[in-house]
Structures are given as C-alpha cells and as structure tokens.
Amino acid sequence: MKSLVIKYWDEVGSKAVSKDNIKFQKNYWIDHFGDKTVSQATAYEAQKEFKASLLQRGLSASSVSKVIAAGRASSRLAWSKHELASMPPFTMLPVDEQDPMGKPINVSEAAKLTRIPRRDLCCHPKLLRGSYPPVKNRCFFGDTNKALAEKGNLVSALGLEPRTP
C-alpha cells in the first residue's frame, strides 16, 4: 500500500492545488500501515481500525473520509494502470447533515451575482446552493425559497432571460 500511496503522490498529489492536504493524507496511510500489502491495508477490520485511529487523533469524520479517499484514489490509479488485479473496497465514515456555509442571500443579491460578466459565475448552481455536503432542498436563499417554488426554476426566480450558448 505504501508504494501505491507514494506513487499517487509523485504522479498526482504533488501537482494538485491541495497538495498540502494530500501530503498529510499520504502520511497518515504510511504511518499507520507501513509496509503492509494492499489486501492487508484494505481489509475490513484494518480499515475499521484505521478510521478509529484517525478519529482518536482528533480528525473529524469528514477529514477521515478525505484520508480514506486519498487511499482509494491511490488504489484507483494503480488499478487503472493494471498494477492491481481488482479495485479494493473502501468505505467512508457517515457525515451528519450540515447547514450550508456562509450567509443566506436573497433573490436580489443572487440576481446581481448572475449579472457579473464572468462566465464562470453566471447562474452557477453551486454558488446558490449549499453544495458540500449535498443537502436536499436546502438553498442559500433562506426565506426566499418561496420565489423559487412559485417561479419553478432558478432563471425565472432571478428575473433573468434564458441564455443560449
């Protein structure tokens, strides 16, 4: 497992925007499993013990899942290059439903944001919804969700004209 995690770091993680986080995640895998094989490190009991040790270190459930995701990504890279015969199973920790981060915005504020001439901000749904973790029927509009319900779609609720690409 150690060689997979290091290879993933060398090929992908060290070049990523979040390389500092990926480096910590890589080190958690190496510190805990050392020279164990992929099958030993990904066995159900070993994964259960690994998650418990990460929680004992003070990591949140969300952070533990990100560490597990780094190991899964390492295995997926090796599997895609035919260095592993099969993709080992990984399970994340359940994360409780959370409120969206940030201040709720009203419809007029959202409409102003969509009129910014930057294409990447124009009507971007993640800008207007709580996107991590995904929460059903939750939106940054606060009490103005009624406008969305009445108009039927975001473009109409914001008073915009539909655009054609």
Image (cartoon, rainbow, N blue to C red):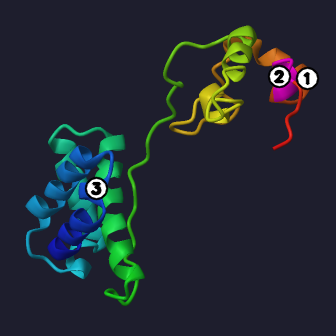
In magenta, the rendered stretch is 155-160
Q: Nearer the viewer, residue 87 or 77?
A: 77
Q: Is residue 6 above or below residue 114?
A: below
Which residue has dot 1 on it?
Answer: 151
Q: Which label is found at residue 15?
A: 3
- Sequence-wise, the earlier of marks 3 and 2 is 3
- Pick whichever, 145 or 114, lies toward us: 114
Residue 121 % position (x, y): 63, 30
Q: Does the segment drawn in magenta span residue 159?
A: yes
Q: Is residue 61 above or below residue 116?
A: below
Give amino acid for label 1.
Answer: Lys
The image quadrant that residue 47 belongs to is bottom left
Residue 108 in percent (x, y) is at: 74, 9
Disc 2 designates what residue? 148
Residue at x 24% of width, y 78% of height: 38
Measured along the vertical axis of the image, is residue 43 above or below residue 150? Answer: below
From the viewer's perspective, tell me whether residue 92 is left or right of residue 100.
left
* Mark 3–mark 2 distance (CA, rounded to whole Å): 41 Å
Give the mark toward the camera: 3 or 2.
3
Element type where label 2 sits in the image: helix
Q: Residues within 10 Å of mark 2 (few under 14, many from 20)?
A: some
Distance in Å between CA atoms under marks 1 and 3: 44 Å
In the rendered image, which quarter contains the C terminus? Answer: top right
Q: Which mark is residue 60?
A: none
- Amino acid on which the number 3 mark rests in the picture: Lys
- The N terminus appears in which quarter of the rendering? bottom left
Whether residues under marks 2 and 1 lie with C-beta atoms below 8 angstroms apart, the answer is: yes
Say if 118 sits above or below 27 in the image: above
